[in-house]
Amino acid sequence: MATKAVPNPKPAATPAAKAEFTSKARLGADLGLTNDDLIAMYRLVALTRAVDERMWILNRAGRIPFVISGQGHEGAQVGITRAFEKGHDWIAPFYRSIATCLTFGMTARDIMTAQYATANDNSSGGRQMPGHYGDARRNILSVSSPVATQLLHAVGIALAAKVRRTGQVALTVMGEGSSNQGDVHEGLNFAAIHKLPFIFVVENNGYAISVPSSKELAIEDVADRAAGYGMPGIVVDGADVLACYAAAREAVRRARAGEGPTLIEAKVTRLTAHSSDDQQTKYRSEEDLKEGRGHDALPHFRAQLREAGVLTDELETALSAEIKAIVDDATDFAEGEPDPDPSTAMKWVYAEDWPSETPPPWGMGGGWVHASHEAADGPGPAGSTASGPGGADET
Ligand SMILES: Cc1ncc(C[n+]2csc(CCOP(=O)(O)OP(=O)(O)O)c2C)c(N)n1
Ligand SMILES: [Mg+2]
């Protein structure tokens, strides 16, 4: 096999010189990250943790009904999402993706209003189940409650991006338990055949609710399955933010270069119960929980940045104060927002405007309203032909 010529190769470094170079290299330099980038990433990990902890307090205080937490996943989420282009690429998240959504532009207020299900909540106007974040303005799909369905949505978006040559990349994320769903097989096979700009991230926290991964998978690493589809499968330590960033950066490069999809499995830990509705000490040993706490990206990243001299006492104090203010503001804001008007419960369940110039033969052009709602809601939006399903054309 012909070997590739390397133009102007650098002289090989001696082991000693190499070691010296490595110890002097600025943290993140090899990944093109500045100190400001590192601090921005740390801030997101710490902010997400603080928002999440506040959610639990509010739940226990009876202010919000249900919490599904991202604690233990934040480092992997920030590292991976940072490699994508905000407002250009697409993300189909899952219910633990708080850090993913914040990294992609959602705010603490957006997260908190979703928890409170307020009328003006950006995720769904208070219609979604708590923890089902999304933001149409930011290319963040709404979370689907049936796990793994988001993979099909993301693969479809990647197909559209390829056909339209937009240069966009689609990311989807889920847990290792969900990755066993049939939809995943279909989507990965399709994405690999068509070399789609698609990245599949599995956040493997070792549990699907109370079921340990040994009862979910007969293999250690979900990433091993990637070879069967014809795509790279990468295992990365989810407590190592920069390793996660490096893996995602390479996957994004591959996707944009037309080289096809990548599967990244981040080994993370679930620091809380599955949700606010279960008690994990009923199914996890103290030893297991202790091990999980030792695999938390937040203290690891903090120590790494402190050792590199990037995070100083002064900076950390300022960041803590800023984060506390953001979380307090988000809580106060959501507390003060109105609940949705019950009479709008059916809004957005069906399309109200047909998006193309030519309405489909079965109607819907100009909006429509279900016959059984007319008595309560009037005849529907102005100009409604009331000819959609449930209207005149209903069979
Ligand atoms: C199709 C479907 N089956 C079952 C459920 C119930 N359910 C919600 S979360 C969950 C566990 C998923 O575990 P995993 O994918 O490992 O993600 P994790 O919660 O551990 O992050 C299950 C079974 C669901 N929402 N959808
Ligand atoms: Mg899991």
Image (spheres, rainbow, N blue to C red):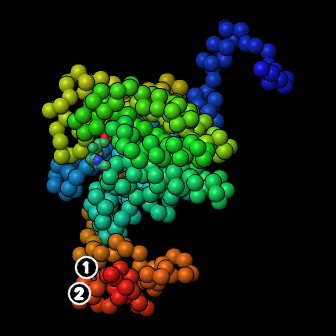
On the image, the x and y values in percent for residue 349 come to: 34, 71
The amino acid marked with disc number 2 is Ala
Give whichever of discs 1 and 2 has the lower sequence position. 1
On the image, the x and y values in percent for residue 94 come to: 38, 48
The alpha-carbon separation of the residues under discs 1 and 2 comes to 9 Å
The amino acid marked with disc number 1 is Ser
Is the CB of the residue bearing disc 2 within 8 angstroms of ligand 1?
no
Q: Are marks 1 and 2 in contact (CB under 8 Å)?
A: yes
For the residue labelled by badge 2, is the local secondary structure a helix, a strand or a loop?
helix
Q: Is residue 394 above or below residue 118?
A: below
Q: Residues within 10 Å of mark 1 (few under 14, many from 20)?
A: few
On the image, the x and y values in percent for residue 15 come to: 67, 8
Q: Which residue is mark 2?
A: 376
At 34% from the left and 30% from the top, the residue drawn is: 217
Q: Which residue is mark 1?
A: 343
Residue 210 occupies which quadrant of the picture?
top left
